[in-house]
Amino acid sequence: MGKRPLVRRRGRGGMQFRASDRKISKTNYPFYPLSVQHEGKIIDLLHERGRDAPLAKIQFQNNTISYIPAVVGSKINSKIQFGLSSDIISSNITSIQNIPDGTNVCNIEKHFGDGGTIVKSAGTTATIFSHSVSGVTIKLPSGKFITLNQKNRAMIGTIAGGGAAEKPFMSAGMKWRRFRSKGRKYPIVRGVAQAAYVHPHGGGRHQHVGQSSTVSRNAPPGAKVGSIAAQKTGRARLKKRK
């Protein structure tokens, strides 16, 4: 009896290929009313598998616990303000309508109440660009501008752990473990170099695809390999100059 191709096993998303195993907690803001001011304390800084940025374990005055990506300069026992009256200093969380232009922010809510979904990677930061009637315009790390609801909350500062990506792997084993913790594929082997039962392009004496390498965007796992929904393939012919 044959085996399922490796690409199909990956597409199925089994426990072997998931990055959600042994996670500490979801990272989001507590949903407090904006009019109520709260203060919390960082009681621990944690490392979570598959996440470059450290997590700050924050305990608020009502003894609720939240896990939020730590910013540069975070320390244990340091205070964090949460609310509209928060000071514009690092680690504090407030609505973007109260943050002046030119301020670096991170962990921004895309929709009010989602707990922060934008600019959460290690070493990233966004900039408050302008305020208008339609909302607050923010410049993202990619250089793209986005306008959000004025009530959305954000954290002042830059996400910590920015130098992790600059550290060399030094060995293939370290890179394999790093990629596995993120649920990413490594090593990436050409399909034509694999066996026929592992990959649709595999098998054969010579390393060539042997079939159409352009597949539909809606192809199921195991068949979605090669050129995905390609409109043009191959090398364009250069026009000869007259």
Image: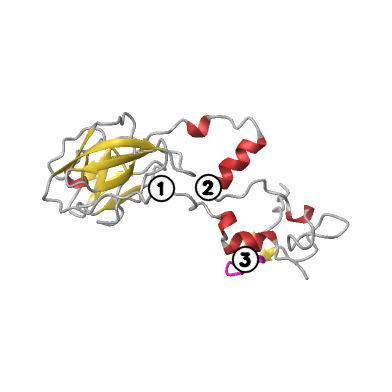
The N terminus lies in which quarter of the figure?
Answer: bottom right
Amino acid type indicated by mark 1: Ile
Dominant secondary structure (helix, strand or loop) of the stretch shown in magenta: loop
State whether residue 76 appears in this view. Answer: yes
Amino acid type indicated by mark 3: Pro
Mark 2 lies on residue:
182
Mark 3 lies on residue:
221
Amino acid type indicated by mark 2: Lys
Badge 3 element: loop
Q: Find the distance from the CA under tag 1 to the CA under tag 3.
A: 29 Å
The residue most toward the front is 63
Mark 1 lies on residue:
24
Where in the figure is residue 61, as x and y percent of width and height? 17, 43
Q: Is residue 240 above or below residue 122?
A: below
The first of marks 3 and 2 along the sequence is: 2
Tag 1: Cα neighbours inside 10 Å, few (<14), some, or many (≥20)? few
Q: Which residues are magenta?
A: 215-226
Where in the figure is residue 173, as x and y percent of width and height? 65, 37
Q: Quadrant of residue 179?
A: top right
Residue 219 highlighted magenta (yes or no): yes
Q: Quadrant of residue 44?
A: top left
